[in-house]
Image (tube, grey):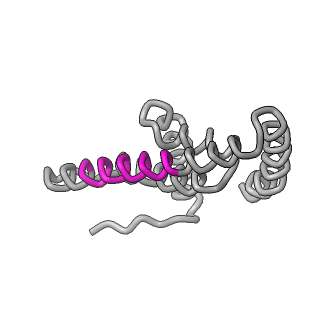
Amino acid sequence: MFRWLLLFILVVPALEIGLFVWAGGYIGPWWLILLIILTGIIGAWLAKQQGLETLNNARESMAKGYPPQEHIFDGICILIGGVVLLTPGFITDAIGFLLLVPVTRRPFKNMFQNIARKWVENGKFRVYRR
């Protein structure tokens, strides 16, 4: 897992810089800056909307006596998507929007659930129950 994170930290910024240079030459630097600001604003709004909706769904689930397991993983995806969207770049924006839109969030949510399941099975993570 650490290898993938390190690869992500090293490769993605280099690709982002290349895309910025290419896009800046193609559409112009001012349009590029406007596009970066616009995606940040839309991403923050979408993260807030999806986060509040997920929080309300988790509250309803707990009020009915059910554990909010699905909503917790939705919240993790929304948090990561919001943070990634606030960093400038086209690749990170695409990943962020994929994590924020409910339809495209499901594969990521399943991936996070599988990682958590493996951590529990390997003893890296403990779940305490009453």
- Placement of 105 over or under 63, stated as above or below: above
- Chief secondary structure of the magenta portion: helix
Quadrant (top left/top right/bottom left/bottom right) for the C terminus = bottom left
Pick whichever, 112 or 28, lies toward us: 28
- Placement of 72 over or under 22, stated as above or below: below
Q: Residue at x 59, y 58 (%)?
A: 122
In the rendered structure, the answer to whether residue 32 lies left or right of residue 110 reads right
> Where residue 43 sits in the image (x, y, percent)?
50, 47
Pick whichever, 67 or 123, lies toward us: 67
Bounds of the magenta span? 41-57
Q: Which residue is drawn at 68% across and 41% down?
A: 31
Magenta region includes residue 1:
no
> Where residue 98 sits in the image (x, y, percent)?
54, 37
In the rendered structure, the answer to whether residue 117 lies left or right of residue 33 reads left
User: Which quarter of the picture shows residue 38?
Assistant: top right
Q: Which residue is drawn at 70% across and 43% down?
A: 32
